[in-house]
Amino acid sequence: MRNLRVVAFAVAASLAAIGAVAASLAALGIAHAQNATTLKKEMLGQWELSTTERSKTCVVTIKGDPVALGYKLELEPACKTALPFTKDIVAWSVRGLDIVRLQDATGEAVIDFTEVEAGIFEGLRQGEGVYILQDLAAARSMAKSMDQMIGDWAMVRGNGQPVCGLTLTNTEAGPDNFQVFLKPKCDAAVAQFNPTQWRLERGQIILMSKSGDVWQFEADDNAQWRRIPDTADPLIMLRQ
């Protein structure tokens, strides 16, 4: 009789464990469905597909109407010229929890995007590089911000001592980068760095030298741009 009780207890425990696993799997399935459904709703509207620094852009209108193997989208006519790979895009879909796929007629990915910041998605095409998909209104606001970057700047130390002057231009200097020119009589460290290109990336000013060195500057609460990572003697860029 005792053995029967032991067996019954073991069976009950096993059934409880199976039930718990099944409940967990069901919960995961519901969460997955909710995440995919939420992402699908959030994607509806107009988006900008672009190179990382928006030197080439394309407006994509994402819709919720079902089509074969996905959902409907529309590309503006200029897309095929600006970004030739878009000629193969006929639909979109959500894959897994967080992948936004722009796909061809067979459902294969032309490019897959994942969200890296709120409302900003990145996708990689092998041999071409990274592309950005972001809300159209936000992208145009960023473009206005970039226009405001163009012109003369002063580079100063934390105590306000000037160390260099430079000019950011909108003259293209390779993929997604633009020319920058140092003015005479720069501090030795800046002159040695000697940046020749710049870009605006994820809210940071990126300065690049011919040798591949990179300095990054991030806006602070005082409307000035500080080199990061920050130091006890910071380097700051001020708009002139």
Image: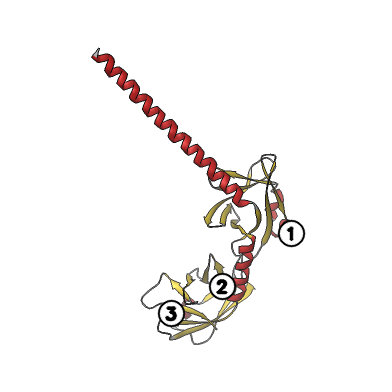
On the question of residue 164 being in view, the answer is yes
> Helix, strand, or loop for circle 1?
loop
On the question of residue 100 being in view, the answer is no
Q: Quadrant of residue 46?
A: bottom right
Nearest to the observer: residue 227 or residue 10: 10
Q: Which quadrant would the N terminus be assigned to in this image? A: top left
Q: CA distance from mark 2 to mark 1?
A: 28 Å
On screen, residue 194 above or below 85: below
Residue 118 falls left or right of residue 10: right
Q: Which quadrant would the C terminus be assigned to in this image? A: bottom right
The kind of residue tagged 3 is Ala
Q: Nearer the viewer, mark 3 or mark 1?
A: 1
| Residue with the most extreme top position | 1
Expressed as whole percent of the image width and height from the top left, the position of residue 26 reads 48, 34
Expressed as whole percent of the image width and height from the top left, the position of residue 2 reads 24, 15
Badge 1 crowding class, 10 Å Cα cut-off, few under 14, some 14 to 19, many 20 or more, is few
Instruction: Identify the residue under disc 3.
Output: 189
Q: Is tag 3's residue or tag 1's residue first in the polypeptide sequence? A: 1
Total marks shown come to: 3
Expressed as whole percent of the image width and height from the top left, the position of residue 147 reads 62, 74
> Helix, strand, or loop for circle 2?
strand
Q: CA distance from mark 3 to mark 2?
A: 17 Å
Q: CA distance from mark 3 to mark 1?
A: 44 Å
Q: Quadrant of residue 17?
A: top left
Nearest to the observer: residue 183 or residue 234: 234
